Image (cartoon, rainbow, N blue to C red):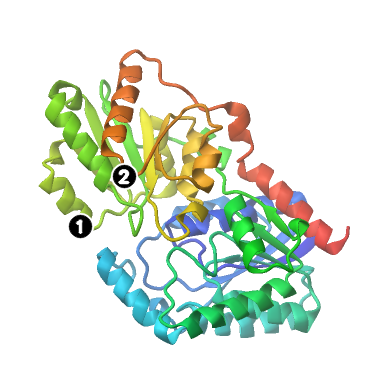
Amino acid sequence: MFNVLVLAYYFPPLGLSGVQRTLKFVKYLPVNGWKPTVVTCEPGAYYAFDETLLDDLKEKDVEIHRVKGKEINSRMRKKGVVEMPPEFIRKTLKFISSIFYVTDNKKSWSVQAYQYCRKMMSEYKYDLIFISGPPFSMFEYAALLKTEFDVPLIIDYRDLWLGNHFAIYPTPLHKSLNRKKEYEVLKSADKIIVTNRKIKERLMEYYQFLKFPDVTILPHGYDPEDFNNNPQNITLEKGYFHLTYSGIFYEHITPKYFLEAFRMIADEKPEAAKKMKLHFAGILRKENRKLITRLGLSEYVVEHGYLNHTDAVGILKSSSALWFMVGEGKNSDTISSGKMFEYIGSGKPILACLADGALKSTLQEYNAAVIVPPADVLAIKNAILSLYADFQKSSLSEGSTEFRDKFRRDYLTDILAKEFNAALRV
């Protein structure tokens, strides 16, 4: 059994989508000959928590070490769950933060985690370091650990670093410094993992020393055990067409056009609209609720709030169809939404409001997806009605099993373990 030091700020009991990828890798690494030791944050203030996620690691050969930082989340830890701010406030706070923190505002945690890892690595032998980002500030320190202890380093990009769709560069200097830091990390890494081809293309465009084999694409996925062993605690009323969105909205991801499309259905085909329910499983901001009220759609909407992962999967399984969107914006073609792969795992029909990009390219092979432009209200309306017509005829499509199997978490972790072995040349 080899030992891998896993560095991940986002890890259970923190909730939301950023924790799933690393959690599932850690869950399945032991059966592939690797014992993970996770260094993560001590839970502070955050938008959502899910203690049940840690059940995945019960009776697994996994260690978890929690490090307290001095970043805003840690300083507000007594608050526990905090309300997600309106989008314009989030962007304002992000701009202010970006002035003072070149990489991201998790820098103070990264410093503390680096010191903690140095002590661990001086006392115990680790065969490899694996780190997933964002946040990317810890990437710099992972590169230092690699150099100090002569241990292979594999870095995992869930999103872009330079040019990230959330990134704000207050000055050209800020952008230049990020490029310099990323360059140094990439030079240090033994292997680079990315979630999709678009990220790989951007990295190879930005940093031309990279060769094609240096970067491996390992997409997000779904855990078949989450679906096969799900108790389905949430049951939906029979006789209705249940269309579900799971997750949060921000920046280029908005319910605006979808809700406007449904308003058209309610006006033009009121009898059909009465047989439909729009489910939101996740955190709705105040501006989202105001939009629902302004459009007069409250009678059609079911808000479930933030659910633990078991119940979130249960509602996917109980739904008639699922929908999500990613709008057009800076590098939005590189976004690799974790929720889409959970949708794929469900086998349910998917209404995807997408521009060209990584997600659209993937979903075109699913065989049960209706893909429309993200802001085309008429196309969204017609797609909803088409799915409803199939529902009435009991002829809703199911996603290709062969295609879905490519995104199983156990299969993807097997590939990751092979990359670990290759880094050790074993």
Query: How far apart are labels 2 and 1 at the CA level?
Result: 18 Å
Describe residue 246's horizontal placement relative to residue 378 as left or right: right
Q: Does 23 sit left or right of 370 as displayed? A: right
Evaluate whether residue 83 shows in this view. Answer: no
Name the residue: 44% across, 57% down: 51
Observer able to see residue 421: yes
Location of the N terminus by quadrant is bottom right
- Circle 1 is placed at which residue position? 287
Q: Nearer the viewer, residue 294 or 200?
A: 200
Label disc, if present, on residue 239 of the rendered structure: none
Q: Which residue is mark 2?
A: 375
Q: Residues within 10 Å of mark 2 (few under 14, many from 20)?
A: many
First in sequence: mark 2 vs mark 1: 1
* Residue 186, x across and y down, in percent: 69, 71
Q: Amino acid at mark 2?
A: Ala
**Which of the two residues, 220 or 262, is positioned nearer the viewer here?**
262
Q: Residue furthest top?
A: 393
The crowding category of the residue bearing disc 1, from other C-alpha atoms within 10 Å (few below 14, some 14 to 19, many at least 20), is few
| Residue 57 image point, x, y percent | 59, 54
Q: Is residue 39 above or below residue 55?
A: below
Quadrant hosting residue 387: top left
**Where 132 falls versus 381 (above or below)?**
below
Q: Is residue 351 left or right of residue 2?
A: left
- Identify residue type, mark 1: Glu
Q: Tag 1, which secondary structure? A: helix
Residue 7: image quadrant is bottom right
Which quadrant of the figure contains the C terminus?
bottom right
Residue contact between numbered discs 2 and 1, judged by CB atoms under 8 Å: no
